[in-house]
Amino acid sequence: MRKIWKPILYAGIGGAGVAAALTAYLTKKYPVHETSSANLPTSIKRALPKDTNPYWRYCEITIPANTTVQRTKPMESFIRQFYDIWALKLEEAFAKSIGYQEKFFPAPYTKEYIRKAHCGGLFPELSRDDNTCMIFFGPGGAIPAMADLQAFEAVPDDRGNLRLRYYTGNVDVPGAQTDEGVMGWFHMMYGFSLFLRKAFIKGAGYSDDALDRRIVGVVNTNVSWSSTLTADGQSGFNPCHANVPQLLDAVSRGVMLQGALPVPFPTISLHESFAFPTSMFLRRNLMSMDTEEMIKAVPADAIVLIGGCDKTVPAQLMGAISADVPAIQLVTGPMVTGSHRGTRVGACTDCRGYWAKYRAGDIDLEEITAVGNELVPSAGTCGVMGTASTMACLTEALGIAPLGSACPPANGGQRLRVAELTGKLAATKLLRPSEVLTRASFENAITVLQAIGGSTNAIVHLLAIAGRMPGVNLTLADFDRIGRKTPLLVDLKPSGANYMEDFYRAGGVPTLLQALRPLLHLDAKTVTGETLGEALDKCPPPFAQDIVRPLDNPLYPAASLVVLTGNLAPDGCVLKQSAMASGLRQHSGPAVVFKDADDLMERIDDPDLPVTADSVLVLQNIGPKGHPGMPEAGYIPIPKKLARQGVKDMLRVSDGRMSGTASGSVVLHVAPEAAVGGPLAIVRDGDTISLNVDERSISLELSDDEIASRLEEWRQAKVKGRGRKGTRPKRGYAQLYHDRVTQADTGADFDFLRADPEEAEHAAPSAA
């Protein structure tokens, strides 16, 4: 006897719920046809078990030839449209109707989830014939009693149209069609796990009233994962995040003021200066994985990301994008300035300036020790436009943080009020990162990056963040294209003269965004659902100040950061031209080559080093694989003998990074790096290197034949992958990093963490 379909009964999590969702939707919108197994496509009949004769129905859809469809993989395109949207929504609606909360459900279905979880059962493989692609779901996913067979057929016709059929086959399994059968399996599979989860969380003292509210997870990046803790359990190694306990309190207050429940949880926390071999190696990619998996693991409706120190914010954004749970960023804020002999000082541009004076013999040991007591006078991130401050400003431009949240000092009352506001916003309806971060958002961020004279590190971080977003496809060329029309407007060190506390008093990022309005995508969304233009309209009007210049009176005419290419850097490299000596913008000189960071430390101050002010200092093997971890060793010090002759700047070239607080004629992020056989690897002492900033070129003055010959010699010597220890790491995270990290021009992320290029695009038009 044929069974009658009752789709709403199939709303468990798994294949059966998908059958219900798709059937309920498609049968309302499209005509339903009945058929028998004998009339099925060959692909389905071939895959069916023997003696299986289900009752089949199908819906048919024709997609015209001019419709955007992934022709090579029409199944996946079709599945995403209906499976992702309808299945999850109907399952959630059904579960809520019997008392379960949205926060207990897993992340939305993805293509990988479909492949791994729902291509199993009776039909573990994709079936094909000459013109039909098939994918099967069943039987019944997580609820075995519901043995539902589902299949998609996609057949292109001779006019380029695509015919899609969705088949459902119902097998007669005792108890499968009864309310008791469905609900019994649902409660057996999921009721106990939810009951157990609630029982354990009550051990923390939560009531049913608290647990029935919206839950906001708050990422605590000041809990050390090392064994060294302060008395209150906070990390003793992270002064940038020393105010996180106060921020947690303020965020929690904001969440509770909106009637929701805040629940903090920890992720990795290490300071920029306390990570070996480099913070880039240890922190950013590893922390992004930690953040992603923790967000996925906890039953939270929204996430507040508290971070500050250089790699923390990009790591959190990368992880949050990959998890794609509604999230909002809160930075710890910049430190305030100190004073040394009547001069205002702050980390860390002044750190480098005073150290250069010490190396040159202009100040003595007593004075360098004294200034060291004033450079970092409070908690918080560096008080100039270094990497941390740059990334804080960019979170506002991206729309993932509240306007006005980047600049308030870490130790001030406004920082706590920003934290409270962030908690309030998280307790209301937030958008997912995938709904906020578009091509337009990233172009806005690049515009702000150029206008603040931001850190070169932000380029590699933005490339990595954008690399997690399907369809954004950000490249180095975008930074140069946008930079050519964006002037430097913010007068902060190292490109200017002031500090983040001055930027705060001038109105912060909203003041800058108002000045940049003609260059921005004002229709880009923010995390609250407003557009950037709408959010700016609510900000106080600008007032008289001298930190943020107007467009017609810039500090620097355009392109504070430039992208260079040439035979020395085929895939590009970067330079902060707004902080370099103008006389070196066009320069040629002989190379003085250091093979790695150890060689540099050993020889840079050798009195016999054959170097002059016209030389080009070249440091090899400090890229993502070479060091490993792309350290900030690219800021090669001026050789002591030249510093004592009064030399303040030289052209320097490497495949590494430098601190965003540093200045000088320093070419960075050369790609491909030396350790993988980039041309930088074959530069020798005395070779001429030429830089022309206006032409955006950097060249090794050798013939193509000579370069090819040297590269072949390098390959034959089998030094590929040479790092400081000379070999591929034998185990653990170090080996994973070595094997899977990408080059600087794509963000130095792990290749397996980047977005699938076949996923849906989030592109927006470029700025006019």
Image (cartoon, grey):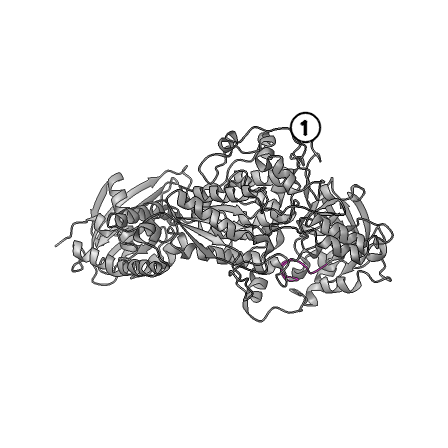
The residue lying toward the viewer, choosing from 434 and 647, is 647
The residue lying toward the viewer, choosing from 244 and 492, is 244
Q: Is residue 307 above or below residue 740?
A: above
Residue 228 is situated, as x and y percent measured from the top left of the image, at 56, 65
Which quarter shows the N terminus? bottom left
In magenta stretch: residue 627: yes
Q: Residue furthest bottom?
A: 730
What amino acid type should be assigned to the residue bearing mark 1? Asp
- In the image, taking residue 360 as reference, residue 499 lies left or right, namely left
Residue 652 is situated, as x and y percent measured from the top left of the image, at 76, 52
Asked which secondary structure carries label 1, the reply is loop
Residue 123 is situated, as x and y percent measured from the top left of the image, at 31, 60
Residue 182 is situated, as x and y percent measured from the top left of the image, at 21, 56
Q: Can see residue 662? A: no
Q: Which residues are magenta?
A: 620-630
- In the image, taking residue 697 as reference, residue 27 lies left or right, namely left
Q: Which residue is mark 1?
A: 552
- The count of marks equals 1
**Label 1: few (<14), some (14–19) or many (≥20) C-alpha neighbours in 10 Å:** few
Q: Can see residue 578? A: yes
Which quarter shows the C terminus? top right
Residue drawn at the location 30% of the way across and 54% of the way down: 13
- In the image, taking residue 205 as reference, residue 679 lies left or right, namely right
Q: Residue furthest left?
A: 1
The residue lying toward the viewer, choosing from 31 and 343, is 343
Q: Is residue 727 above or below residue 275?
A: below
- Which SS type dominates the magenta stretch? loop
In magenta stretch: residue 480: no
